[in-house]
């Protein structure tokens, strides 16, 4: 394997010079790799993607001896560096918000220096881990200091936690020996008075770690060999060759789990069990109430799983998915309202309040995305004006996001989440016992007997609205059809495991139609927003040129909406649903299932 490090003789000199120059430039801009190379107080926050190889080792002494004796004909030098004592404290909220957001929160102390890091929980690819790291220095390692950190980690912590506190989960105490991986460069003058130019392309660390578990129990121990590329740089062929050589020579085995995962296992912590609200399976033999609770539990879990990503605000799709979950819960409460306890009506209104705050941000995300696409395609003058419009829209989004976080941080939202989760955990039977004097309820009726009427009512409303629709109909009528189609589609998805494949022939065209009508509504809303921005007298005045551009693009949105209206009425999904044959076929499926619920269990596909 050492031949991989000896393949840069005379014919490759030019390539080597270019590669070394590139690495020197990256080194100057990126600084050191692993934490602790220089004072935390002298460091700026860093947001980059870490690329490292991780190996388990039975003993570290043979690895250290091999590194100290290493020599290569390729110009790669292994240079011993400092030994460090590191204490890593891992934190999360009681409800695992960081974990659910896809991050581990770590506070590292090395000597008198401390820093906070949010590291993404990306799985390993073979023996390589590629993870995002967001780091900022701290004055000390106290939890109170962490909560007040002014940089990118502190901002994310406050968005995630709202008013909650962090809790210490476990510590990892490490003795670390570092080795720099340097590439010799004989193409220029030596830097810093050294005998040769050397470019840092990565480093090796030998970690002997222990995880204290508690009194009377032996600490968990880990011996780990890690190789990391330079901060913010892609691994070079020289670095990859070195890793292959070291792994082969020392017979190293790739680490199967990270230190964070090891800490969870060693301390018996289990993030997944914290969010369960009861069974979510759906069978044709279940009652209407059992199906209703299973549907609500699924969507409640989705809402909670996307809340951390919504709070951080980096991925617009997290907010979109959380909003959809709240919509589906409200729809399910309407579909199954006769089988749900009376207090479900309060939950439905509270979810409407949450969805409104999410929707304000989501609508602006959609409009900003479209304007950015247009700006990239526009000429120089229009691009400048679109940039001014985007500035206004982004300011509005910042304001809407702040209001959304106020909602998610409120005692009202906390009450909703806790009370709703408790109702779902109790289940339909316990809830029925709590509700006194409720009279007859369809909660205990078989779903195959009760569902046909519920679904048929929604199809009739959709069909009636579709029959009245013309190309000249007002935009509100198309939006009304979209809402009725969404309610019908959701009702079908809620019972898709009851009727199996029979629901798919209706769900697919409804979904296509909903997407088209959604684009129509987005265009109508965007046109109205641009008109309002261009003519409002409130707030800072929009430059005349930008106002004119707003008008131009508002008209463009309206033309797009008109085109969609025309195409929708002629589309295959609309015609297939409006003619009614697909619906009649499904009516037969429901009739057969009512006669024999067990035979209806024909599809193993689960629609979430």
Image (cartoon, rainbow, N blue to C red):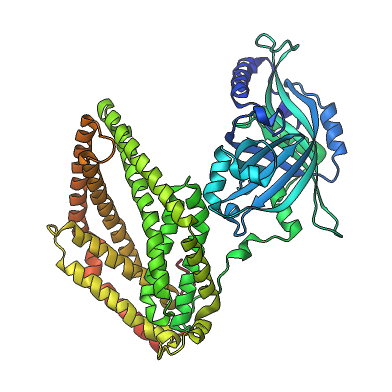
- In the picture, measured across the screen, residue 562 lies left or right of residue 177, that is left
Q: Would you place residue 126 above or below residue 179 in this image?
A: below
Q: Would you place residue 40 above or below residue 598 in this image?
A: above
User: On the image, which quarter does residue 398 sit in?
Assistant: top left
User: On the image, which quarter does residue 191 sit in?
Assistant: top right
**Furthest residue toward top:** 189
* Foreground of the two, 466 or 370: 370
- In the picture, measured across the screen, residue 600 lies left or right of residue 540, that is right
The answer to whether residue 493 is visible is no
Q: Residue at x 43, y 78 (%)?
A: 498
User: On the image, which quarter does residue 530 sit in?
Assistant: top left
Q: Residue at x 32, y 45 (%)?
A: 367
Q: Residue at x 74, y 27 (%)?
A: 180
* Residue 234 on image: x %, y %: 60, 32
- In the picture, measured across the screen, residue 511 lies left or right of residue 472, that is right
Q: Would you place residue 141 above or below residue 332 in this image?
A: above
Q: Residue at x 48, y 83 (%)?
A: 286
* Foreground of the two, 48 or 417: 417
* Residue 89 on image: x %, y %: 71, 47
* Foreground of the two, 229 or 247: 229
The quarter in which the N terminus is drawn is top right
Q: Would you place residue 522 above or below residue 433 in this image?
A: above
In the rendered picture of this protein, how many numbered marks are placed on residues?
0
* Residue 73 on image: x %, y %: 76, 21
The answer to whether residue 476 is visible is yes
* Residue 604 on image: x %, y %: 49, 72
């Amino acid at each position: 394997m050492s031949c991989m490090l000896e393949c840069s003789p005379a014919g490759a000199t030019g390539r080597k010079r270019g590669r070394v120059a590139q690495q020197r430039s990256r080194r100057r801009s990126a600084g050191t790799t692993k934490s602790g190379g220089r004072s935390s107080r002298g460091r700026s926050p860093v947001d980059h993607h870490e690329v490292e190889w991780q190996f388990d080792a039975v003993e570290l002494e043979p690895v250290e001896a091999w590194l100290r004796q290493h020599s290569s004909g390729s110009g790669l030098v292994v240079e011993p560096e400092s030994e460090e004592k590191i204490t890593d404290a891992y934190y999360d909220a009681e409800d695992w918000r960081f974990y659910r957001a896809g991050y581990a929160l770590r506070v590292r102390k090395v000597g008198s220096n401390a820093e906070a890091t949010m590291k993404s929980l990306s799985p390993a690819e073979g023996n390589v881990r590629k993870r995002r790291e967001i780091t900022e220095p701290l004055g000390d390692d106290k939890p109170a200091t962490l909560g007040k950190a002014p940089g990118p980690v502190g901002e994310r912590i406050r968005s995630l936690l709202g008013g909650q506190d962090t809790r210490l989960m476990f510590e990892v105490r490490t003795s670390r020996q570092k080795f720099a991986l340097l590439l010799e460069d004989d193409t220029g003058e030596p830097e810093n008075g050294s005998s040769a130019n050397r470019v840092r392309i990565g480093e090796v660390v030998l970690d002997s770690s222990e995880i204290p578990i508690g009194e009377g129990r032996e600490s968990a121990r880990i011996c780990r060999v890690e190789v990391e590329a330079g901060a913010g740089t892609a691994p070079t062929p020289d670095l990859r060759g070195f890793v292959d050589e070291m792994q082969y020579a020392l017979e190293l085995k790739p680490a199967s789990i990270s230190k964070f995962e090891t800490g969870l296992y060693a301390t018996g912590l289990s993030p997944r069990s914290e969010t369960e609200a009861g069974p979510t399976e759906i069978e044709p033999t279940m009652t209407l109430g059992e199906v209703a609770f299973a549907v609500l539990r699924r969507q409640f879990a989705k809402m909670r799983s996307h809340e951390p990503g919504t709070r951080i605000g980096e991925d617009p799709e997290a907010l979109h998915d959380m909003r959809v979950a709240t919509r589906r819960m409200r729809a399910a409460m309407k579909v199954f309202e006769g089988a749900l306890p009376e207090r479900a009506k309060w939950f439905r209104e509270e979810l409407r309040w949450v969805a409104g705050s999410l929707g304000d941000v989501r609508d602006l995300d959609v409009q900003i995305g479209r304007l950015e696409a247009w700006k990239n395609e526009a000429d120089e003058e229009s691009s400048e004006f679109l940039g001014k419009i985007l500035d206004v829209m982004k300011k509005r989004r910042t304001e809407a996001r702040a209001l959304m976080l106020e909602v998610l941080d409120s005692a009202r939202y906390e009450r909703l989440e806790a009370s709703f989760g408790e109702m779902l955990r109790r289940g339909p039977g316990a809830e029925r016992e709590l509700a006194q004097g409720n009279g007859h309820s369809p909660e205990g009726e078989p779903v195959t007997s009760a569902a046909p009427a519920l679904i048929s009512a929604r199809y009739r409303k959709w069909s009636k609205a579709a029959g009245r629709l013309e190309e000249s109909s007002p935009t509100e009528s198309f939006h009304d059809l979209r809402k009725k189609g969404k309610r019908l589609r959701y009702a079908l998805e809620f019972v898709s495991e009851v009727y199996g494949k029979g629901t798919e022939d209706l769900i697919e065209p409804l979904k296509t139609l909903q997407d088209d009508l959604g684009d129509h509504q987005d265009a109508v809303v965007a046109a109205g927003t641009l008109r309002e921005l261009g003519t409002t007298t409130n707030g800072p005045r929009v430059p005349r040129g930008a106002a004119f551009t707003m008008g131009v693009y508002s008209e463009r949105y309206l033309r797009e909406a008109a085109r969609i209206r025309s195409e929708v009425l002629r589309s295959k999904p609309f015609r297939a649903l409006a003619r009614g044959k697909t619906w009649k076929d499904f009516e037969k499926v429901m009739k057969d299932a009512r006669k024999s619920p067990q035979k209806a269990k024909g599809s193993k596909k689960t629609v979430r």
